[in-house]
Image (spheres, coloured by chain):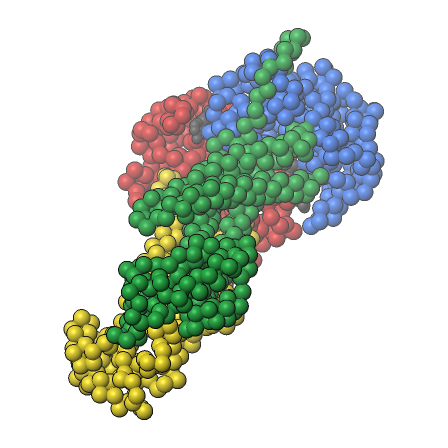
Chain colours: A yellow, B green, C red, D blue
Amino acid sequence: MPEAKSGVHHAAPHEPLLIFRGQAVARLLPVLLGLMSLLAVFFVLQSMQRLFVIQSALRVADGELTVIVPTAPGLPDTTEDPALRRALDVLEATVGLTRIRTLDEAATRRLIGDTLKAGLGAQVPLPAVITLGRTPRVEVSMTELRRVLERAAPGSVLDDNAALRSQLSAQRLAEAGSTAALLAVLLLVVSATTVLTISQSMDLQAPVIEVLLMSGAPDRLIIRQFTGFVWRLALLGAGLGAGTGCGLQLLLWLRSPASDPALTATLLPALVLVAVIIFALIVLLATVTTRWRVTGKLRQSF
Amino acid sequence: MPEAKSGVHHAAPHEPLLIFRGQAVARLLPVLLGLMSLLAVFFVLQSMQRLFVIQSALRVADGELTVIVPTAPGLPDTTEDPALRRALDVLEATVGLTRIRTLDEAATRRLIGDTLKAGLGAQVPLPAVITLGRTPRVEVSMTELRRVLERAAPGSVLDDNAALRSQLSAQRLAEAGSTAALLAVLLLVVSATTVLTISQSMDLQAPVIEVLLMSGAPDRLIIRQFTGFVWRLALLGAGLGAGTGCGLQLLLWLRSPASDPALTATLLPALVLVAVIIFALIVLLATVTTRWRVTGKLRQSF
Amino acid sequence: MDQISVDFPARLGVLQDVSLRVPSGGFRFVTGASGAGKTTLLRLMFLGIQPSQGRLEVFGRDTRKLSRDQKALVRSRLGVVFQDFRLIDHLSVYDNVALPLRVSGKARKGDRDYVHELLHWVGLGEHADVRPEQLSGGQKQRVAIARAVINRPNLLLADEPTGNVDDGIGIKLMRLLEELNKLGTTVVVATHSAALLERFDYPAIHLEGGRVKAAGQSGAAP
Amino acid sequence: MDQISVDFPARLGVLQDVSLRVPSGGFRFVTGASGAGKTTLLRLMFLGIQPSQGRLEVFGRDTRKLSRDQKALVRSRLGVVFQDFRLIDHLSVYDNVALPLRVSGKARKGDRDYVHELLHWVGLGEHADVRPEQLSGGQKQRVAIARAVINRPNLLLADEPTGNVDDGIGIKLMRLLEELNKLGTTVVVATHSAALLERFDYPAIHLEGGRVKAAGQSGAAP
Ligand SMILES: Nc1ncnc2c1ncn2[C@@H]1O[C@H](COP(=O)(O)OP(=O)(O)OP(=O)(O)O)[C@@H](O)[C@H]1O
Ligand SMILES: Nc1ncnc2c1ncn2[C@@H]1O[C@H](COP(=O)(O)OP(=O)(O)OP(=O)(O)O)[C@@H](O)[C@H]1O
Ligand SMILES: [Mg+2]
Ligand SMILES: [Mg+2]
């Protein structure tokens, strides 16, 4: 028997258990968790971007109104037209409309010249175009506004982008449906893969758990060891994966020439949020699965 | 020593090696491979559907042309209008145009009434609208056609859906880009997960490989055993997964009210093709990885 | 232990009506043919399995009344040498031996030297940093013994601790157990080595087909 | 074998300048302290490792000149009892023992009875359908021996084949090996059991620190 330890015991820095050093699972787990979070983050961000583009187009279409007022032939300046004056008065008196602006001739030609080309002849002068915005807070009845405008300026047309809006709405619905279905399948697969891989890894740890148990380790120590181990691997893996997902998305944004700065400004915080949520979800899933499997193994044993 | 076997040896049905009976890997592998092929098949089918819808809208927009001919005021029947007659003559003389048809008044109102409302007054009669198709085989120059039409019927407009087509093209580009990026990430993740899981499983088989080797099994027998094992699991898992993916897609089609029968008719064979391709890819990947890992293990050993 | 029986789901009557006591501070051999139930008896004692019937006391406490944490406490006072060693493959010899110290949370400044000293004692001073797979059978067995005694257990259960080493080393290892015993540790050694039984004259519990055939003098429970 | 040395990457000189011959049909013991290199010597013989220098002949063929398939052929003529058994955990005892028959592809009608007969002979007739984890140490060892002899090998290499069984069974197992030897099988048994060496009077190759100290009468190569 080697000589007894010296009687005075100094508290030494607590040596870690190190039961996982160099395990195959220590290499596999972070890679798999990383791949899963990469896929989830990138997919959610791409879907969000698609939906966001449709949504913002819809918001613009929703908020923008155009009134086209036929002008009397022969007037040197369309702004003097009495029908236009009356239409403007009506619009300015209506609560819920903002940014009322009459377009100059060049802008008018640009906006409606193409579609009206067929109808414009020598006899028919270019109509006046008023663009205006709708404030989202006040509900303005389009029918009522049309009625009032018709009385003030007969023949005027109020365009509320109805066709475009319904097309965009349909597109949003289809897109959202497809995205939801894909997202459901994706999350199912990612979670199932995470849970399965971790369960499998923990099954392989059964001999280690047994040795720990027989060395007098209480349950909570064993559980803490294993969850801590998986927690660190998951932090590493899911962190790298989510980061790569974000990076990929940013790269695609920066490369795409048509990147709208407003869109980027809104999506950038969302990107961080999504990455953090998915990262947290995967880490949580990994840790909870580990706890569950290790507890199960412990319960099986005497 | 037990008594020697009887001298006469009858050839008996070859008993299988059964080295994998009841292994944990035999449960995990098909589930994971199934999940991977489910995800891949469903994702590819959904993306294909999206692209296909845009593509078919684009094809329609591409093939349809509209000519709007201003008619002289006062004529009882617009079909008698000489400008319209001349325009029709020009169109019929042009190679590459088909289905030339003049719309009646109701159809005309429906098609362009909305957009032209502003320009139509008492003085301006409803223009005549000719719809026609472009045959995809012959390239018709739009500029040339416009020039000829202007000479035949001054003030006529040739609408080749340029705006819609460019919008759809842009959408197709964006959609294709996003889909390609997602598909690349997805395939990467699916392949990596498949390869990693199988490599890990085969690493766990090292003791079995060693025992087989020491029992005098030649390399090709060991490789055959393992690839055969994974092959069967992959067939089962990827088959079920790809099947579920297809089923899910079909379910979504059947439930969606706006399902275009032509679209379904084209996509249905594609669905089967995609499922088969992904199924084959995953099975191939699994088998090749197994072969590679087992061969590696064998090369390591003496 | 009173009238203890052990049934495994697949096999009934592995141990039948076994009653015995090992006095605190005692030294006992457990003998019997292969498959007689020696390992099973030791597994009972380190709370590795539950008796299907009968009453089992370890350190004077009825094991049926212990909570899981109390069982862990009991196990932390035990040292076990498994017949198949149960070393952790991916840890070095040093880490394997130091494991019980780390688990107990009683880390001391002198631990490092103590582990090395013990490894040296069992003849593995130069193998501290290798993995168990690079050891010979007898070397693995000695690592298992070092791990079992590192924590100064109150009760040491050793299953064939000398099955894979030559007689010289075997005797040295038995002397290690004897010294521990002199310091107050109760020792139970399962063996079928007739040579060992001849050389070391301690009472033997002889098992035959799951029953005790001849027990040495019994005293107080361990 | 001529002047064979074995170095492991982590450890040089595990075997040094070992030269020996085991005659075809002979019976040899390999003895030596724990860690002397007995298992390593057997691993050389079943082509489990390559000599870092020297020339190794098995069945009269230089192992360096064999292709992998030829090595497999050589191994199929060998039977090996590993010190740590190496049973396949998820196969039943029956399937473990039958494995070499299936690998050899020489399936015969009488195989089933033959396996059962052999299991009965080693005292495991009733355990054919259980998994190795449910066996005692000695029972596992007997499964390992049964697996090694099932194929009627030309050369049988047994590493501590009696380390986990009591003397009675040990002698019975040695008699099994002797009978095989009488039928023409060359047998090499590594052991440190002095009792075995006394009882069975065959030449012994004694290893000390990786060198042969005393070899029995040598004859033709195995
Ligand atoms: N987990 C188990 N399930 C079913 N039966 C078991 C289990 N463990 C052991 N047995 C059976 O119990 C009997 C006694 O086994 P035990 O391991 O206690 O024997 P032993 O005395 O240690 O033998 P040995 O000297 O060979 O190690 C054996 O017949 C064995 O097959
Ligand atoms: N894979 C390996 N890598 C490095 N060293 C090894 C390896 N295998 C064995 N050794 C070393 O070689 C030496 C001889 O080992 P071997 O297993 O041949 O001994 P042995 O004679 O069988 O001993 P025992 O009786 O204890 O089984 C030991 O010191 C061991 O540590
Ligand atoms: Mg035992
Ligand atoms: Mg050895």
Toward the viewer: C187 or C111?
C111
| Relative horizontal placement of residue A28, taking residue A132 as reference (left or right) | right
Residue lying at 65% horizontally and 11% vertically, measured from the top left: B9
Q: Is residue D100 above or below residue B200?
A: above
Q: In the picture, which quadrant includes the N terminus of chain C?
A: top left
Which residue corresponds to the image point at 71% horizontal and 39% vertical from the top-left? B302
Closer to us: C19 or C182: C19
Q: Can you say whether D101 is above or below A77 in the image?
A: above
Q: Nearer the viewer, residue D39 or D131?
A: D131
Could one spot residue B260 in this view of the protein?
yes
Residue at image location 20% in from the left, 72% down from the top: A142
- The answer to whether residue D58 is left or right of residue B255 is right
Based on the displayed image, in which of its 4 quarters is residue C211 positioned?
top left
Placement of A148 over or under A213, stated as above or below: below
Ligand 4 positioned in quadrant: top right
In front of the other: D69 or B212: D69
Q: Position of residue D39 (x, y in %)?
A: 68, 36
